[in-house]
Amino acid sequence: MSRNILVTGGAGYIGSHTCKALHSAGYIPVTFDNLVSGHKWAVQWGPLVRADLKDRDALGLCFEQFKPEGVIHFAAFAYVGESVTDPAKYYANNVANTIGLLEAMRTYGCRRIVFSSTCAVYGIPKVLPLTESHPSAPINPYGHSKCFIEQILTDYGTAYGLRHVALRYFNAAGADPDGDLGEDHDPETHLIPLALRACRHGTRPLTVFGTDWDTPDGTCIRDYIHVTDLAAAHLLAMGYLETNKDGRFNLGNGNGYSVLDIINAIREVTGQEIRWQAGSRRAGDPSRLVADAGLAKRELGWSPCYPDMTDIICHAWQWMAKHEGFLA
Ligand SMILES: NC(=O)c1ccc[n+]([C@@H]2O[C@H](COP(=O)([O-])OP(=O)(O)OC[C@H]3O[C@@H](n4cnc5c(N)ncnc54)[C@H](O)[C@@H]3O)[C@@H](O)[C@H]2O)c1
């Protein structure tokens, strides 16, 4: 049997870390990526098919050539603000292109898919920590696009026997502990790399979006999960689909950190000051998002190796030092 796994978006942040984990477990990750936000240097663990998901011929050729036994689907646009101003772009790439991928899977008899979903499917939490039974009520087109795909996957399961796991990530953070890979988005919107850049360059202060939230220090609270722990969950999810039809799992550490907690933790790790300024709240930002990932632990046997915020920040800082060529 083929050990190939098709990884859409395998040149991106979470995708590339997952390709490394797949390679370590004996699979061949076949990255399908148009490099719109991913990087060629991040594809180190298997072949790269450089193509756009909307190119059905390229997708078909890829299935024909590599005969993957499963798909891990990361490729998407993921800027919440942009999804509000340009929803067409998000529904075309995240929803329509996913349907194209699922059709190719049907055509070539590939029956297992692990899908990158998000805590944005929950919208504003009614209770915390969030479990998978919390109602889905997204508040932006990005969250809706992920919710639609979850439904489409369920419907494809009922009608065509497709098996799927939707992994609802909270905030992905950190970098490969060996320093091979890390986060390099442009533009970067994630707090930890932005704060590390503010530390490193010191030219522009970090903007904190809202200091008047109903939280102990007034800043938003989020649940950060190490990217290597996310990667491991994808392998477990692929294995889970050998005997199960579908699943939806939160992936987070269950610990809430405020923006100021993160800034303080970064000060401690780097020994450097971070200049920050208060900005206004961003529309649609929930004040707190914290996961209950008990289901993933029970059903997948998932157990994060790097729950400690110091490790997450250390790895991200070491990666930035290596990538930008300075001494951490
Ligand atoms: N980073 C997070 O904290 C986070 C949280 C929740 C969910 N997610 C989801 O996880 C997935 C990966 O996130 P990431 O941070 O690694 O993003 P990323 O931008 O680093 O990776 C996405 C990859 O998909 C590729 N891609 C996009 N559209 C494509 C297309 N039409 N054809 C081929 N390739 C295409 C990009 O070039 C990129 O390499 C996304 O689906 C995102 O919505 C991320």
Image: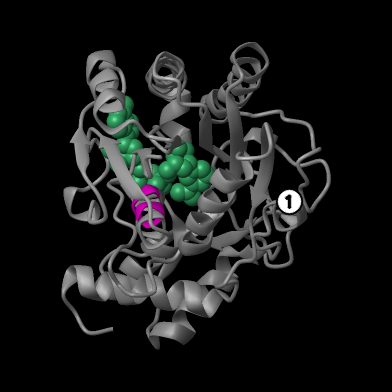
Residue plotted at (40% across, 54% down): 22
Q: Position of residue 313 (x, y in %)?
A: 45, 74
Residue 111 magenta: no
Q: Is residue 130 left or right of residue 61?
A: right
Query: On the image, which quarter does residue 69 sit in?
Result: top left
**Which residue is pictured at 68% across the width and 16% down the height?**
158
Residue 281 drawn at (x, y percent): 57, 46
Where residue 272 appears, as percent x and y from the top left, is 37, 84
Specify whether 46 is left or right of 99. Answer: left
Disc 1 Cβ-to-ligand 1 distance below 8 Å = no
Q: Which residue is mark 1?
A: 299
The residue under the point 39% across, 66% down is 175
In the rendered view, does 190 fall on the left or right side of 322? Answer: right
Is residue 278 among the parts visible in the rendering? no
User: Is residue 306 in sight in this rendering?
Assistant: yes
Q: Quadrant of ligand 1?
A: top left
Colour scheme of the picture: one colour
Name the residue located 25 percent from the left edge and 75 percent from the top edge.
Answer: 321
From what the image shows, is residue 278 above or below residue 80? below
On the image, the x and y values in percent for residue 234 come to 52, 49
Residue situated furthest top in the rendering: 159
User: For mark 1, does the 10 Å Cα neighbourhood hold few (<14), some (14 to 19), or many (20 or more) residues?
Assistant: few
Asked whether 87 or 163 is in front, the reply is 163
* Main secondary structure of the magenta stretch: helix
Position of 233 relative to 217 (above/below)? above
Give the camera-side residue of 216 and 51.
51
Q: Amino acid at mark 1?
A: Glu
Q: Which residues lie in the magenta part? A: 15-19
Is residue 70 found left or right of 62 in the rendered image?
A: right
Quarter of the image where one finds residue 62: top left
